[in-house]
Amino acid sequence: MVAVLNTVLVCIFAIGLSSTYAGVVLGSNRNSDGQVIQTKTEVKKETIKDPVCGMVVRDQKKELSEEYKGKVYYFCAEYCKEVFKKDPASYTTPESKPQGHVH
């Protein structure tokens, strides 16, 4: 009976250990205590804001971007891109602030 109990306990330990390892290998973002961890595959994305309205741009499509003085700017909508293209200098200086959504 003791041998069976030892075998069961070893199996439970092995399953727990392997599931923790599998979670790390498969990209789980929680450790065995349930705490959130950063995995090697997780890449922090830079927060990019539309220079015209200040909205966070999550989808950085080529058609919604514009290069100005060697830097690429991203936009939430075609409207903001067109406004930027008319006067990019007013949206790229350190003192310029986004004007909120006007479209």
Image: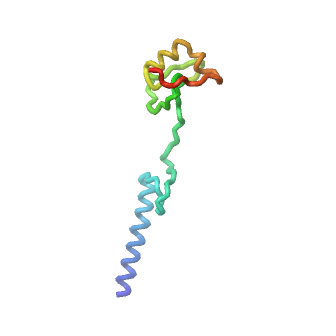
Residue projecting furthest to the top: 86
Residue 40 percent coordinates (x, y): 51, 49
Q: Name the colour scheme.
A: rainbow
Residue at image location 44% in from the left, 66% down from the top:
17
Please say if 13 is above or below 25. Answer: below
Residue at image location 53% in from the left, 31% down from the top:
48
Which residue is nearer to you in this view: 21 or 60? Answer: 60
Residue 62 percent coordinates (x, y): 45, 24
Which residue is nearer to you in this view: 20 or 84? Answer: 84
Residue 75 percent coordinates (x, y): 48, 24
Please say if 96 is above or below 33. Answer: above
Where is the N terminus found, in terms of image quarters?
bottom left
Please say if 96 is above or below 22. Answer: above
- The reply to whether residue 71 is in sight is yes
Q: Which quadrant holds residue 12?
A: bottom left
Residue projecting furthest to the right: 95
